Image (cartoon, coloured by chain):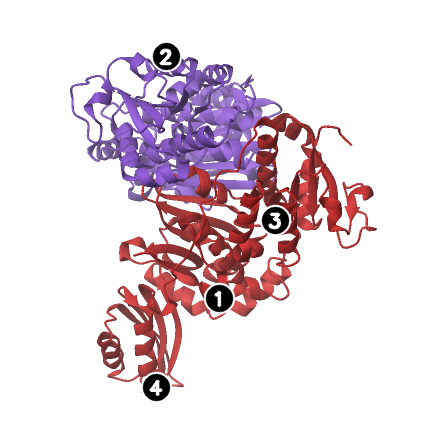
Chain colours: A red, B purple
Amino acid sequence: MVADAIGIAMLGAGNVGGGVVAALRNSRERYARLVGRELEVRAVLVRDASRERPGLDSSVLTTDIERLMIDKVQIVVEVMGGEEPAHEYMRHALEAGKHVVTANKEVMAKHGAELLGVAAAHGVRLFYEASVGGGIPVISPLSRDLLANEITAVTAIINGTTNFMLTAMANDGVDYDEVLAEAQRLGYAEPDPTADVEGIDAAYKLAILCGLAFGLEVGPEAIDREGISGLTANDFAYADELGYTIKLLATGRLENGDLIASVRPTLIAHSEPLAKVDGVLNAVQIEGDLVGRVLFEGPGAGAAPTASAVLADVLELARDYVFTDREPAPLAALSAARVLPAEAHRSRYYIRLTVPDRPGVLAQIAGALGERDVSIASMIQFETDESTGTAELVLTTHVAEVGALRAALDQVAEAGVVQWVGNVLPIAGASSGAGG
Amino acid sequence: MVADAIGIAMLGAGNVGGGVVAALRNSRERYARLVGRELEVRAVLVRDASRERPGLDSSVLTTDIERLMIDKVQIVVEVMGGEEPAHEYMRHALEAGKHVVTANKEVMAKHGAELLGVAAAHGVRLFYEASVGGGIPVISPLSRDLLANEITAVTAIINGTTNFMLTAMANDGVDYDEVLAEAQRLGYAEPDPTADVEGIDAAYKLAILCGLAFGLEVGPEAIDREGISGLTANDFAYADELGYTIKLLATGRLENGDLIASVRPTLIAHSEPLAKVDGVLNAVQIEGDLVGRVLFEGPGAGAAPTASAVLADVLELARDYVFTDREPAPLAALSAARVLPAEAHRSRYYIRLTVPDRPGVLAQIAGALGERDVSIASMIQFETDESTGTAELVLTTHVAEVGALRAALDQVAEAGVVQWVGNVLPIAGASSGAGG
């Protein structure tokens, strides 16, 4: 053991943990130069301490959490994932006076405010750059570089699995089931893809971003959320004809003090920077009163990129530990968000309907929408199916309240004017006075 | 005067200075909450102290630099621009024990290493986020968020004027003179556009980025540089046919310990994220061993975005000043770069030639190139001009040394095989094993 090294303990030694250990080994000398002392891994909590781990001496492996709470550990790195026991262990470490670095979006989304409070109460720090956007700096720009700004909106593509799938659907005209199978074959999607394709993963990350951007605590369950499984190749073809692509956008913004937070497949104009973020890449766009719009793009997952973010936090803590007697900066406590109910969200919308191919239908739909103050911006009739006597109709609206829009569609569906209500997707765009 | 406020002095009160003053006034309460004390502008160096400045009490205006060096000033903000006297004043402020925040790319490119040394010697800090990329966080990500990475390459679009012009040339098929006049009419280009269109401004910023990314000191005059004034509408048409657009790329990378640094119009594949950065936007792409590629995009100029970056630095200094007894982190002194001579740069290249429209010409050109190990990847003959009996020929090469390529072209030009050697532009792309 190096006498005056900084001691690191790790919760977990899986994929990301392995990346962290490998970088600590490969860049040992450079990190020691940056910090002024060596960084040494002194305890690693694992399920099976008898299994060999590349780069780790078996003497540091343990199944006992208390082995991490020793004096010679200053920083605890949580890379085990999942809600419990990660949350409980992080709390324990903070209470034991350890600085904590985590990559855990679920714990930070559900318990971030609580844990940051525990850290402040114990004079230690909790860093979580790796919890959103993998290797892309996001947390730090929001908490430091854009601090002079009143943040007005955050719009993000923060799930690589779904962005890979949507990019393939847009480029290759394939349907959802086919592209999911392909993503699973390539290892981009889990055997159970629910957390990704239903937007749960993205909602965790959006909750964290809203805390930083707006100082508001919002539970991930309070975020309006819809996944991508209802999208078809037709939606992409129609959107393209209208000048848009479809992305799973996580958006947060404030309107009259209400937080509008949603994760939804959203039409976005081809010319927008976020529309050009393809494949497994992630991107976070932040709007502030001074800076206007800035965008951060890069790999949102993977062992090495995530290790890059984890180790940025570790190096900052270690440098502070060595060079300053830094008091933790005062915690700007989060306020509970007043969340705007999903049915009151306003946006331009894309609506796909299957209608009987007969006169009068368009007028009845337009009438029902008009009665509820939903104004139609464009209407295009696509494929007619001679065998069933139906046609596909795509409408776009001006800015409207989605609750009113849904009520109008329910009415025409019940009256048999519309045979089937397909996707209703928000259209992103500042110019429309609305967002996704 | 607020008793325990943090005192700020400003060098200059022009466009950016006005943006800083306006934000300090508009966000006074929020900044005070973030810092724990008010921020107060206590002296502003101007040329004419009798002129009224919006938001500034006339009592703080001065033409005497010594009025800024008083005890009640902790942070000096330099927003006057230009090399001298800004450089001399910044040095004076650091020696007087003031922290300095600057937006000055020219001073940081030419004197950054010296001034950072002065700051370290006097126990104060010199922050310069606003000197590159306007409001886009660039300096801070390089110095903190990506610190765990060995940075392998920096590729950037860091001049909004030229990117606006190149975007218009690519989209509208117009020539250089026309688009320059348009940029001047819109206020994007100066009456004397030299610093922008010849890549001088971009070279300053690249020198700063190389210092941060590689720890190497490189004078802006040592950077291989070519402007955009030689580009024609034809180059964009030919590039597009080959699958590329043309951007003024600032690139820095290390190869065998040599720094390869250049600012050049460069062909870049349409699918690359940097190819999609349009108009006055800036973007910086950073490649690291852990993170892979990350890209930061946003407004590279303007009073409010630049104030956003200046004030991020001010807020960090003020928070440190209030909450810690922070010792400045040790300065990783820059080493002098061993700069690879421009003629030894290797890349794939695009070459546009005017040749006599007669048999045997292609064979002679290919022969001359082949003798010097320059291998042709594609060759397309474009417009034939019947009246002069000439044709335009566009070649792309495999990775080659530009010195050898130039020698071969000189030879065929002297021999009359080629009538005119047009643009020789690097082609960006990691896949080629080379960069722009």
Rendered residue at 64%/42% (across/down)? A98
Q: Which mark is residue B88?
A: 2
Secondary element type, mark 1: loop
Rounded to the nearest angstrom, the CA distance separating label 4 from label 1 is 25 Å
Q: Mark 1 is on which residue type?
A: Gly
Q: Mark 4 is on which residue type?
A: Glu
Label 3 or label 1, whichever comes before in sequence order: 1
Rendered residue at 50%/57% (across/down)? A163
Rounded to the nearest angstrom, the CA distance separating label 3 from label 4 is 48 Å
Residue B284, percent from left and from top: 45, 36
Residue for badge 4: A414
Are discs 3 and 1 both within one chain? yes
Chain name for mark 1: A
Are discs 2 and 4 both within one chain? no
Looking at the image, do the residues carrying marks 4 and 1 touch, with CB atoms under 8 Å apart?
Answer: no
Residue A43, percent from left and from top: 74, 43
Residue B1, percent from left and from top: 28, 27
Are discs 3 and 4 both within one chain? yes
Quarter occupied by the N terminus of chain A: top right
Tally of marks? 4
Quarter occupied by the C terminus of chain A: bottom left
One can see residue B221 in this view? no
Residue for badge 3: A302
Are discs 4 and 1 both within one chain? yes
Chain name for mark 4: A
Q: Mark 2 is on which residue type?
A: Glu
Residue for badge 1: A227
Q: Nearer the viewer, residue B147 or A125?
A: A125
Label 4 or label 1, whichever comes before in sequence order: 1
Q: Nearer the viewer, residue A397 or B436?
A: A397
Q: Mark 3 is on which residue type?
A: Gly
Q: Nearer the viewer, residue A303 or A43?
A: A43
